[in-house]
Image (tube, rainbow, N blue to C red):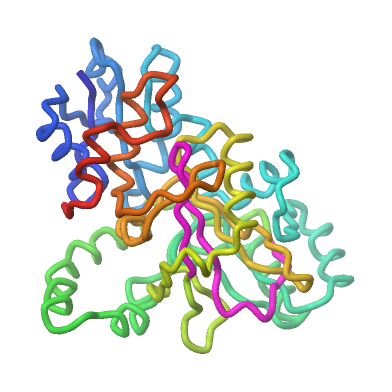
């Protein structure tokens, strides 16, 4: 018996579907409930695709999952997999600690140290808040004066944890695929607005630190490599029009021949060192055309992984097909240690079927 935190629109939809198809006993859970520990008595494993959409989940998910691990349960995501999720400050120190090729990144919690660094730094740089997805809370800082203004605000009134509802509206409209897609987005608008308002009300205001990252010019795309178990899925994401950012553009290329194999090698190495169940690494190239990690995440939207034409194993063997990440995560969690990292027979037989 496994437990699944049920959130419509999340990975739980597919997990529940697969459990029913494969006659895997499962129990719906409410991981945000006060009695979650007692709900999990008798379970073998717990799956919870927690995200930024609910302000409550980033607040308590890490702690609850760590507690369930202490109780002896297998969980997805594990603490090693997700503690750094949506925390670019934590990612800086983590990637430096394992000697990963991170884009040079500076974090300051003392305003005097931040101002002294700004005075001597070259510009432009990229300013980021510690959280945010799809290029939220990321901006190019072209001058020292602009950096000083951001510094003053960071150590003053701070920044909202998430941008307003109309943020990125032009990009979302540009990638609306026809009338049906537009109607679907319109139908979801009230729920999206409510979620955004909750995040504004309950998300912690960002203040007391600044984070700058070296700007990597001459990058028209980034490369995302997603590691799930012993599988690497790779795709390129083109930049938004007239923008330096690729995340959230929705303009992807899934040709595996266009993915630099060095990115795959680095992603495998980082995932192994961090002992993660799944890990998405975003890469840019520096002036010497060496791949550098921009940021990492434990999860991403499922469809771009499925749209990849296959995956590499650690020996760079190629496995063609289309695979839902939810299926692979479930197979890995239920596999024995000797078999973990390869799809189960049932998963392989149905990997190419659409949900």
112 and 51: which is toward the camera: 51
Count numbered badges in the picture: 0
Corner quadrant of residue 71: top left
Residue at horizontal 28%, vertical 16%?
44
In which quadrant is the N terminus drawn? top left
355 and 56: which is toward the camera: 355
Residue at horizontal 54%, vertical 75%?
221
| Image location (x, y in percent) of residue 87 | 55, 49
Question: Quick check: is 216 in the magenta stretch?
Answer: yes
Secondary structure that dominates the magenta span? strand
Q: Is residue 69 shown left or right of residue 211?
A: left
| Image location (x, y in percent) of residue 164 | 38, 71
Residue stretch in magenta: 211-236
- Any part of residue 138 in sight: yes
| Image location (x, y in percent) of residue 60 | 40, 35
* Rendered view: 111 above or below 12: below
Question: Quick check: is 232 in the magenta stretch?
Answer: yes
Residue at horizontal 18%, vertical 44%?
13
In the picture as drawn, the residue positioned furthest to the front comes out as 317
172 and 25: which is toward the camera: 25
In the picture as drawn, the residue positioned furthest to the bottom comes out as 242
């Amino acid at each position: 018996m496994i437990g699944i935190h049920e959130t419509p629109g999340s990975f739980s939809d597919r997990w529940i579907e697969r459990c029913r198809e494969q006659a895997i006993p499962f129990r719906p859970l409410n991981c945000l409930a006060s009695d979650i520990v007692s709900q999990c008595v008798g379970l073998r494993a717990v799956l919870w695709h927690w995200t930024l959409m609910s302000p409550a989940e980033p607040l308590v998910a890490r702690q609850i999952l760590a507690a369930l691990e202490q109780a002896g349960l297998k969980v997805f995501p594990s603490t090693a997999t997700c503690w750094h999720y949506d925390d670019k400050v934590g990612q800086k120190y983590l990637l430096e600690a394992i000697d990963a090729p991170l884009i040079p990144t500076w974090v300051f919690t003392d305003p005097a140290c931040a101002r002294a660094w700004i005075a001597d730094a070259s510009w432009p740089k990229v300013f980021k808040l510690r959280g945010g997805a799809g290029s939220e809370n990321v901006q190019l800082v072209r001058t020292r004066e602009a950096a000083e203004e951001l510094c003053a605000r960071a150590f003053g009134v701070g920044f909202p944890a998430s941008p307003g509802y109309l943020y990125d509206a032009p990009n979302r409209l540009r990638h609306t695929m026809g009338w049906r897609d537009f109607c679907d987005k319109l139908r979801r608008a009230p729920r999206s607005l409510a979620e955004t308002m909750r995040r504004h009300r309950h998300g912690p205001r960002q203040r007391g630190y600044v984070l700058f990252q070296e700007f990597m010019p001459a990058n028209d795309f980034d490369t995302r490599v997603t590691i799930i178990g012993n599988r690497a899925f790779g795709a390129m994401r083109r930049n938004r029009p007239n923008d330096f950012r690729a995340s959230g553009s929705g303009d992807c290329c899934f040709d595996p021949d266009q993915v630099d194999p060095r990115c795959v090698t680095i992603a495998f190495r980082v995932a192994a060192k961090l002992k993660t169940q799944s890990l998405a690494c975003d890469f840019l190239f520096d002036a010497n055309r060496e791949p550098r990690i921009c940021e990492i995440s434990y999860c991403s939207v499922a469809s771009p992984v499925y749209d990849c034409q296959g995956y590499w194993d650690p020996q760079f063997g190629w496995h063609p097909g289309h695979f839902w990440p939810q299926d692979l995560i479930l197979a890995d969690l239920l596999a024995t240690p000797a078999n973990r990292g390869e799809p189960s027979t049932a998963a392989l037989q149905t990997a190419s079927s659409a949900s």
